[in-house]
Amino acid sequence: MSWDAYSRLQLSWPYVISIDPAGPGELFYFGAAHTFDPADPQIARIEEAWREFRPDIAFTEGGFPPFEASRDQAVSKHGESGLLRYLAARDNVPTTTLDPTRADEVAALRSRFSREQIKLFFLLRAVSQFVQRNGPDRAGAEVERILPIYAAAPGLSGSPRSLSELEAAYEDLFPAGGRYVDVQPAWFDPARSGTLLNEIARASSDYRDRFVVERLASHVREGRRVFAVMGGSHVVMQEPALRDRLR
């Protein structure tokens, strides 16, 4: 789906699709509004769908969160992906990730953006997510924690290499934007425009959507009962291509 078409839709979350092609495979795809609240009704809906669908493989967004001892811990620490990992471990269902490697994503983005711009995007997005959940007070410590993680990714070893370099890069990009902890969540919305971060977010989302469509479709065509959870906008964008490939 194009972003113009997406922007004209009136959507509500969750956005759930089920595709049952002629072969033995089937896809249940839950498009979530990301949550870390165990009492969120979406969590109960995912659990109910899991029981009814009886998957033989599960796909999570955001890598491989660790397995937690309880359902509430899994959701509180890792959101819907944590829940899916908890359910899969409980029921002995294999899990894998919907995401491409960071190195592959960086390589795809390099056709349009510099290494510094891409690294700044990843770091500021992580800061935005951290501040939304925890407030700004410990954001500096979080940056120090994640800097080595991003520096280890192929293509991201350059600047910004420190908190001071991140602050300087942010001030150059947003001279009227306050401090780096004031970075706005809307600047990472691929459906919006106006900042460099929105442009990178759109390119990243497009690349990830193409990757996910092929990954899910290939497993369904192999006859797997695939259960996947991802951010709702991705599911909406991917649905036409998935239905076309699994028709």
Image (cartoon, helix red, strand yellow):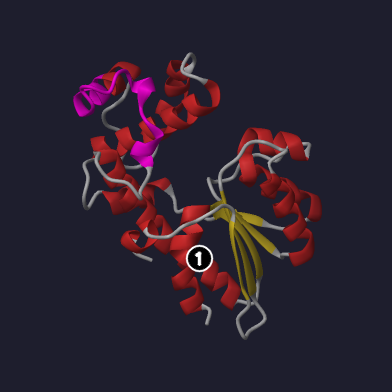
For image coordinates 45% across by 19% down, the residue present is 139
For image coordinates 46% across by 78% down, the residue present is 244
Bounds of the magenta segment? 168-188
Q: Is residue 144 visible from the viewing direction of this image?
A: yes
Q: Is residue 220 left or right of residue 173?
A: right
Q: Residues within 10 Å of mark 1 (few under 14, many from 20)?
A: some
Badge count: 1
Report which quarter residue 198 is drawn in.
top left
Could you say where residue 157 lies in the image, as x and y percent from the top left? 31, 33
In the image, 53 versus 118, the foreground residue is 53
Residue 6, compared with residue 105, is above or below; it is below
The quarter of the image holding the N terminus is bottom left
Task: For mark 1, give the secondary structure.
Answer: helix
Q: Is residue 85 visible from the viewing direction of this image?
A: no
For image coordinates 31% across by 52% down, the residue present is 203
- Name the amino acid, label 1: Arg
Give the residue at mark 1: 215
Could you say where residue 158 lies in the image, as x and y percent from the top left? 27, 31
In the image, 98 versus 177, the foreground residue is 177
For image coordinates 43% across by 62% down, the residue present is 237
Could you say where residue 232 lies in the image, as x and y percent from the top left? 52, 53
Q: Is residue 173 magenta?
A: yes
Q: Is residue 55 magenta?
A: no
Q: Is residue 47 left or right of residue 152?
A: right
Could you say where residue 36 lies in the image, as x and y percent from the top left? 63, 36
For the view shown, which residue lies furthest in the top direction? 137
Magenta portion: prevailing SS class: helix
Report which quarter residue 179 is drawn in.
top left
Residue 18, compared with residue 107, is above or below; it is below
Q: Is residue 171 left or right of residue 185?
A: left
Residue 57, compared with residue 141, is above or below; it is below
